[in-house]
Amino acid sequence: ETGVTQSPTHLIKTRGQQVTLRCSSQSGHNTVSWYQQALGQGPQFIFQYYREEENGRGNFPPRFSGLQFPNYSSELNVNALELDDSALYLCASSPLPREFTEAFFGQGTRLTVV
Amino acid sequence: GQQLNQSPQSMFIQEGEDVSMNCTSSSIFNTWLWYKQDPGEGPVLLIALYKAGELTSNGRLTAQFGITRKDSFLNISASIPSDVGIYFCAGSNAGNNRKLIWGLGTSLGVNP
C-alpha cells in the first residue's frame, strides 16, 4: 500500500455534468500530480500542484482544473464532461516536484461518462 | 498527447523464460523510468535511470538507458506468474520539467 488514496474508486456521470475527484497525498509529500489513463493507453499528464500552486500543466483544456489544500491533499475538477473523458484518473504524490523515484500512485478513480 | 513507442505491445511466455521489451522516443530524455501496473491499481516504479549508458538491476529486472538518450530497454529473467501485468516506460527531460511522458505499455502474460 502506497499511502496515497483516491476517492471515489468508481464514478458514472452524464455528459455535460461536472465531477470532482479527490486525492490524499502520502505523509510528508507536498507535491501531487494528476494523470488521465484512457483504456489501453499510458497515463497522460494533466497538471501538478506543489505547495498549493499549479506547477506545470499538460495539454488539457481549461475545463480540467485543480486545487491543493494546506494538508497537500488535492482535487481534480472536470466541467462539461465529454464522453472522451471516460478514463482512469491517477494521482501521484511526491516529496518534491521532480522526485520521481519517491512518487507513489494511488489506485485511481475510474470515471465513466455516458 | 505525446506517447513513447513501446514494443512489443503484448507478449505471452512460459514461466522461467526471459523477456525483453523496449521503448523509443523521438526526443532526448535525461530520465527513464519503468513501471508495472496491475489491474485496478496505480503504476509501481520498478527501475529509474538517470545517465546515458546506465545499466541498473532490481532483482530479476534489468534496465538500460540508451546511449542516444532516446531509448531504453527492460529485461526480466526467469519469469514467474506474478510478473503478469502491464509494463510502462516513462521519460522526462529538462524541457518538460514536471511531467513524465509515458509509453503505451507492454502487456505480459506468463503461462505456469
Image (cartoon, coloured by chain):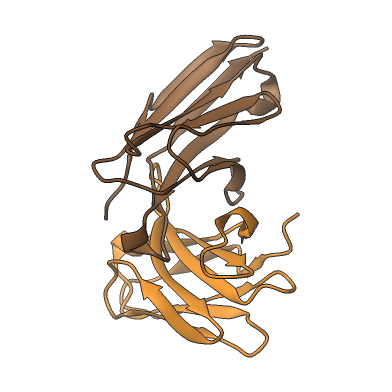
Chain colours: A orange, B brown
Please state the horizontal and vertical placement of residue B15, each as a whole percent of the image. Answer: 65, 11
In the visual, does A47 lie left or right of A11? left
Q: Is residue A102 above or below residue B9?
A: below
Location of the N terminus of chain B (image quadrant)? bottom left
Please state the horizontal and vertical placement of residue A87, each as a whole percent of the image. Answer: 42, 57
Picture residue at 62% right of the left edge, 47% below the top: B44
Picture residue at 26% right of the left edge, 45% below the top: B27
Which residue is farthest bottom? A70
In the visual, does B109 lie left or right of B99? right
Picture residue at 61% right of the left edge, 59% below the top: A103
User: Which of A69 and A11 lies nearest the eye of the viewer?
Assistant: A69
Q: Is residue A105 visible?
A: no
Q: In this view, does B99 lie above or below B32?
A: below
Please state the horizontal and vertical placement of residue A76, each as a whole percent of the image. Answer: 47, 77
User: Which of A35 and A29 lies nearest the eye of the viewer?
Assistant: A29
Picture residue at 60% right of the left edge, 9% below the top: B17
In the visual, does B95 lie left or right of A35? left
Please state the horizontal and vertical placement of residue B93, each as a whole percent of the image. Answer: 37, 55
Q: Is residue B102 above or below residue A111?
A: above
